[in-house]
Amino acid sequence: MATRPLLSTIFLIGVLCTSYGYAQDAPPAGRQDTKRVSGVNIHRDGWDRVVPPASANQVSEPTPIRDLTGIWEPTPGFRDGVFSQGSREYPADGKPEHELPFTSLGLQTWKDHKPGQGAYAVPVAEDNDPFQICDPIGFPRIELFNLRAIQVFQTKSQIEIIYQNDQAWRTIWMDGRELPKEILEPRWYGYSVGAWKDNYTFVVETVGLDERTWIDNVGRPHSDQLKVTEAWHRASHDILELTLTIDDPKMYTKPWIALNKFRMRLQPDWFDIHEMICSASEAQQYIQTIADQADAQKKVKKDEK
């Protein structure tokens, strides 16, 4: 499988805007999501309340049947869903075992995408990530990059998921309707239907995704033929596992698993989800700051010669 050449890029992260897409590990705007007490990072929610860690000897309540309701965060680390180097199972680290089964069109499209992160990162001036200009992050990228807290609401006919990242939401219909046979209007988050495979596993299929979005943070592409399958498995009262599969015959020769049983933990009812929104003005300020510092570095090197 042919791959793109590795590019060495230095990023000046000290000026990251916390609400901007490049703030991979930064907390949401205006507030820290941890504070240090006696040298230990203490996780806290958007209301500045300390979030207790899971107890090692915690006795879980019985697992509810056919119910995903609640506020969930990645576990054991609440930042475990950042995935700045690409999807969890296939990071863009240049290792042969993480090369994806691209078609010729898929490989060329990926080469045309210029991400600011990963082993194939380009300088910020060359980055063409649509999230850089605050286009909606879209699906499935919202689950394959900066997957933070989510809140799930459930009725007889639908499930709604609210994401901390970009303050976005999705509707998953479970009223028996089929996926649309013809997509008249592609959507950033697609058209989703779901059904219970068993009492604890909810399977979702999504199609009709806008081709302008990237699959993950390193520019993996998709076409109008993309179908995403999620399996949300409630392993216990407190643990939810997400498996996500990509199937796009135009871009990949076979389906591939981007997340495999990624674990999320149920948070207390009082947990307040941070605000985390892409701000176009802050994005532009970030880009300009990076460009100015890069120019300053070039001048220093020139003066040293």
Image: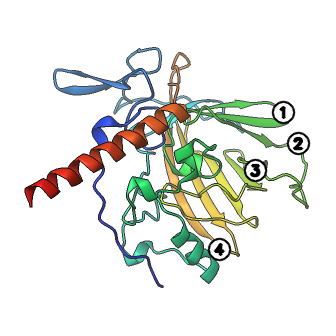
Residue 63: image location, x then y, percent = 60, 35
Judge whether residue 273 can be spotted in this image: yes
Three-letter code, disc 3: Gly
Query: Which residue in the protein does label 3 denote?
Result: 190
Three-letter code, disc 4: Met
Kindly identify which numbered label has been placed on residue 175. Answer: 2
Q: Earlier in the sequence, mark 1 or mark 2?
A: 1
Dots 1, 2 in contact, CB < 8 A: yes
Determine crowd level at label 4: few under 14, some 14-19, many 20+ residues with C-alpha closer than 10 A.
many
Query: Which residue in the protein does label 4 denote?
Result: 251
Residue 258: image location, x then y, percent = 54, 61
Of circles 2 and 4, the one toward us is 4
Quadrant containing the C terminus is bottom left
Q: CA distance from mark 1 to mark 4?
A: 36 Å
| Left or right for 224, reference 305 | right
Q: Earlier in the sequence, mark 3 or mark 2?
A: 2
Element class at badge 1: loop
Q: Using the rendered view, name the quadrant where residue 55 is placed.
A: top left
Q: Earlier in the sequence, mark 2 or mark 4?
A: 2
Three-letter code, disc 2: Asp
Q: CA distance from mark 1 to mark 2?
A: 7 Å
Judge whether residue 253 can be spotted in this image: no
Three-letter code, disc 1: Lys
Residue at 80 percent across and 53 percent down: it is 186
Determine crowd level at label 1: few under 14, some 14-19, many 20+ residues with C-alpha closer than 10 A.
few
Q: CA distance from mark 3 to mark 2?
A: 17 Å
